[in-house]
Image (spheres, rainbow, N blue to C red):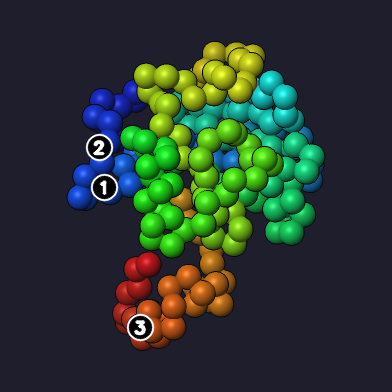
C-alpha cells in the first residue's frame, strides 16, 4: 500500500471488484475482562481515541488501524464471546457503497444481519461461525465514527509504527469448511491438501 498515509486511489466497482470493497475499516474484539484487552492494546502502541455515545464501546487506534473494544451488555459481541471465549466477533470492510456491497454478497448467498444489537448502525452480513462483517463507505474523506462516537484524543495516532491491516486469517473447523464450500469442493480440497500439495482457500 506504500507509505503512510498511503496514496492509493479509492476502489471502484468493477468486473474485477464487483462488491467495491477497499480494505479493512476495523476489527472488533470482546473479552469477559475488557481491561485485559485495554492493557494488551496499549502494549502494542494503540491508544483509546473515542467512546461510543450510548454504548459501552471504545475505539483503539494506531496509524490507519482501528480496533473496536465492545463491552456492551446484550450485544452481538458479548453473546459471541459467551459462546466462543475472548475473540474477534466482527470486522468491517471499507467499500465504495456499503449497501451495494451487502446486496452483492446477498446475491451470492450471504445472509444480511439487521438486528439492533450491532456495534454500529451500518449494513452487515453474517460471517463465518456467526461472526459479522460490516460494510462502511465513509472513510478517508469522512470519518465514519463522528456520528456515533465522542472523541477523547487525536484520531489515528502514530503509535509504534503499525500502519495498516494487511490481512486476517479465520481458523475454521473441518465441519464448517464442509458447510461453507459444499461436498464436492471439500473433497477436492482434501485431495489438494495431501502431503506435497498446496492448498489455497
Q: Is residue 16 left or right of residue 33?
A: left
Q: Residues within 10 Å of mark 2 (few under 14, many from 20)?
A: some
Q: Residues within 10 Å of mark 3 (few under 14, many from 20)?
A: few
Q: Can the viewer see residue 171?
A: yes
Q: Nearer the viewer, residue 158 or 54?
A: 54
Q: Is residue 180 left or right of residue 58?
A: left
Q: CA distance from mark 2 to mark 3?
A: 33 Å
Residue occupying the point 74% across, 30% down: 56
Disc tally is 3
Q: Earlier in the sequence, mark 2 or mark 3?
A: 2
- The correct choice, above or below, for 108 with respect to 72 in the image is below
What is the secondary structure assignment of the residue under circle 3? Answer: helix
Q: Which residue is mark 1?
A: 17
Mark 3 or 1, closer to the camera: 1
The image shows residue 170 at horizontal and vertical percentages of 51, 59
Mark sitting on residue 12? 2
Q: Earlier in the sequence, mark 3 or mark 1?
A: 1
| Residue found at the far left of this picture | 15
What is the secondary structure assignment of the residue under circle 1? Answer: loop
Q: Nearer the viewer, residue 38 or 97?
A: 97
Residue occupying the point 52% across, 32% down: 66
Q: Which residue is mark 3?
A: 188
Residue occupying the point 37% across, 42% down: 100
Q: Quadrant of the C terminus?
A: bottom left
Mark 2 or 3, closer to the camera: 2
Q: Earlier in the sequence, mark 1 or mark 2?
A: 2
State yes or no: discs 1 and 2 in contact (Cβ < 8 Å).
Answer: yes
Mark sitting on residue 101? none
Amino acid at each position: 500500500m506504500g507509505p503512510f498515509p498511503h496514496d492509493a486511489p479509492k476502489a471502484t466497482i468493477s468486473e474485477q471488484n464487483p462488491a467495491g470493497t477497499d480494505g479493512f475499516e476495523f476489527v472488533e474484539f470482546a473479552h469477559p475482562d475488557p481491561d485485559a484487552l485495554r492493557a494488551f492494546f496499549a502494549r502494542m502502541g494503540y491508544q483509546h481515541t473515542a467512546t461510543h455515545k450510548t454504548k459501552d464501546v471504545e475505539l483503539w487506534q494506531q496509524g490507519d488501524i482501528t480496533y473496536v473494544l465492545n463491552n456492551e451488555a446484550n450485544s452481538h459481541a458479548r453473546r459471541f464471546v459467551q459462546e466462543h471465549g475472548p475473540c474477534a466477533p466482527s470486522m468491517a470492510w471499507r467499500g465504495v457503497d456499503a449497501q451495494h456491497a451487502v446486496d452483492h454478497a446477498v446475491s451470492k448467498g450471504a445472509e444480511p444481519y439487521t438486528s439492533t444489537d450491532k456495534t454500529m448502525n451500518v449494513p452487515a452480513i453474517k460471517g463465518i461461525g456467526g461472526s459479522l462483517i460490516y460494510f462502511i463507505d465513509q472513510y478517508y474523506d469522512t470519518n465514519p465514527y463522528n456520528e456515533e462516537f465522542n472523541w477523547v484524543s487525536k484520531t489515528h495516532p502514530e503509535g509504534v509504527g503499525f500502519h495498516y491491516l494487511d490481512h486476517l486469517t479465520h481458523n475454521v473447523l473441518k465441519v464448517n469448511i464442509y458447510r461453507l464450500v459444499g461436498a464436492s469442493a471439500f473433497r477436492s480440497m482434501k485431495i489438494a491438501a495431501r502431503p506435497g500439495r498446496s492448498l489455497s482457500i
